[in-house]
Image (tube, rainbow, N blue to C red):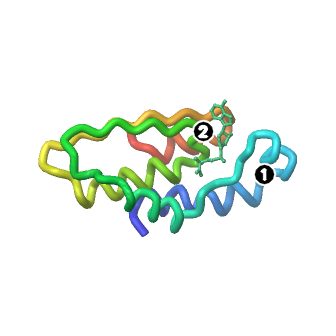
Amino acid sequence: MNALLSLSEALRLTVSSETNRTHKSNFGQFMTPAATAGFMASLLDLDQPNIALLDPGAGLGALTCAVVDRWQQVRAKRSQLTAVAHELDDDLRQHLAATLPE
Ligand SMILES: C[S@@+](CC[C@H](N)C(=O)[O-])C[C@H]1O[C@@H](n2cnc3c(N)ncnc32)[C@H](O)[C@@H]1O
């Protein structure tokens, strides 16, 4: 597993077990496992000069992390990736900010 995705996966396992069911249900917090996020990222053509990624309802950032990790492997020279992640839950947003580099 790649660097960022490993971080979000570790958070998924701990944060999920510490969050009560009602809160998860109210926010629709069912996080994508790393294997699925990695597979989804593998379906994208990331060998592009400019990529803009919007991750609405980012949770712990698995999808963005998977894309950034994969982009780092396959990117063209001077390629740029801009990712914008939105998350409603203050607690998750703090984890997200710590995981995703600015
Ligand atoms: C199904 S989870 C998916 C999380 C992440 N994308 C993943 O695949 O692991 C949806 C996330 O959207 C967040 N969310 C719900 N409503 C939102 C809103 N209006 N704006 C931003 N985030 C929202 C929830 O807190 C939750 O973390």
User: How many labels sit on residues?
Assistant: 2
The reply, left or right, for residue 30 in relation to residue 66 is: right
Q: CA distance from mark 1 to mark 2?
A: 17 Å
User: Would you place residue 37 above or below residue 85 in this image?
Assistant: below
Task: Provide the residue designation for mark 1.
Answer: 19
Q: Is residue 99 left or right of residue 2?
A: right
Residue type for callout 1: Thr
Give the residue displayed 44% in from the left and 33% down from the top. 84
- Of marks 1 and 2, which one's residue comes earlier in the chain? 1
Three-letter residue code for mark 2:
Gly
Q: Position of residue 55 (x, y in %)?
A: 50, 39
Which of pointers 1 and 2 indicates the residue nearer the eye? 2
Residue drawn at point x = 38 percent, y = 59 percent: 43
**Front position in the image: 51 or 1:** 51
Q: Position of residue 18 (x, y in %)?
A: 77, 55
The quarter of the image holding the C terminus is top left
Q: Quadrant of the N terminus?
A: bottom left
Mark 2 Cβ and ligand 1 under 8 Å apart: yes
Structural crowding at the residue carrying mark 2, measured as other residues with C-alpha within 10 Å and reported as few (<14), some (14–19) or many (≥20)? some
Q: Residue 52 sits in which quadrant?
A: top left
Q: Residue tagged by mark 2?
A: 57
Quarter of the image for residue 38 reads bottom left
Residue at the left extreme, as displayed? 77
Q: Residue at x 63, y 58 (%)?
A: 12
Residue 74 position within the rendered picture, expressed as x and y whole percent measured from the top left: 23, 58
- Quarter of the rendered image showing ligand 1: top right
Query: Tag 2, which secondary structure?
Result: loop
